[in-house]
């Protein structure tokens, strides 16, 4: 079960607005085109939510400390995990992960379009009375202290 992981992720405190460290070769991470939509599921009276966004990372010469040989983990890449949950109650709405390839040339940006579906009713019921927020936690498995937490509004 992934409950211990989810509990750890959502109970570690609010990271919104946290300042990144000032190391020169840490990756530069940007999010764009963030969009939340409510869709009606055919054949039922349920609604599903869809969160879509673009994830962009520029490694800025970053190299893993445990990377010993030039072609070690060549196919594996750098792991990124995305966890979508509610503001209240810590409900897991969706999770996914992917790898970012280690691009050799400096200044090269890796882009990935992300689409996450979730149960709208669960999200809306636990989004907070006034805020109507869900939380996206981005966990970069290759560098410590680089997790990002984004509050996404369900209201359009």
Image (cartoon, grey):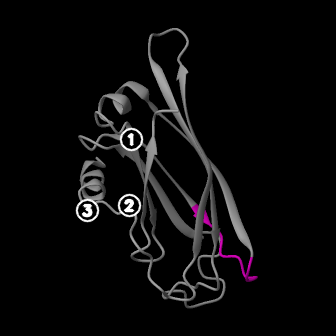
Residue 68 placement (x, y as % from top left): 55, 91
Residue 154 placement (x, y as % from top left): 45, 35
Secondary structure under tag 1 reads strand
Give the overall secondary structure of the magenta segment: loop
Residue on which disc 1 sits: 133
* Residue at the image point whose x is 31% and y is 49% from the top: 2
* Residue at the image point whose x is 74% and y is 79% from the top: 107
Left or right, 68 with reference to 20 = right
Residue on which disc 2 sits: 16
Q: Quadrant of residue 125?
A: top left
Estimate the spatial distance between the alpha carbons at disc 2 and disc 1, rounded to whole Å: 13 Å
Estimate the spatial distance between the alpha carbons at disc 3 and disc 2, rounded to whole Å: 12 Å
Nearer the viewer's eye, disc 3 or disc 2? 2
Left or right, 27 with reference to 112 = left
Residue 112 placement (x, y as % from top left): 66, 56
Compare residues 72 and 42 and report the one nearer the observer.
42
Residue 113 placement (x, y as % from top left): 66, 50
Secondary structure under tag 2 reads loop
Residue 100 in magenta stretch: yes
Residue on which disc 3 sits: 12
Estimate the spatial distance between the alpha carbons at disc 3 and disc 1, rounded to whole Å: 18 Å
Compare residues 58 and 7 and report the one nearer the observer.
58
Secondary structure under tag 3 reads loop
Q: Which residues are magenta?
A: 99-107
């Amino acid at each position: 079960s992934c409950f211990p992981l989810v509990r750890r992720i959502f109970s570690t405190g609010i990271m919104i607005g946290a300042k990144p460290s000032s190391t020169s070769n840490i990756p530069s991470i940007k999010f764009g085109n963030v969009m939340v939509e409510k869709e009606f599921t055919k054949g039922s009276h349920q609604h599903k939510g869809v969160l879509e966004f673009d994830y962009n990372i520029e490694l800025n010469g970053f190299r893993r400390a445990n990377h010993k040989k030039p072609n070690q983990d060549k196919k594996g890449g750098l792991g990124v995990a995305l966890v979508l949950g509610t503001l209240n109650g810590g409900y897991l709405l969706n999770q996914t992960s992917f790898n970012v390839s280690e691009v050799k040339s400096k200044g090269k940006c890796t882009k990935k379009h992300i689409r996450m579906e979730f149960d709208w009713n669960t999200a809306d019921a636990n989004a907070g009375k006034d805020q109507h927020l869900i939380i996206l936690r981005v966990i970069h498995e290759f560098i410590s202290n680089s997790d990002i937490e984004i509050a996404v509004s369900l209201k359009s």
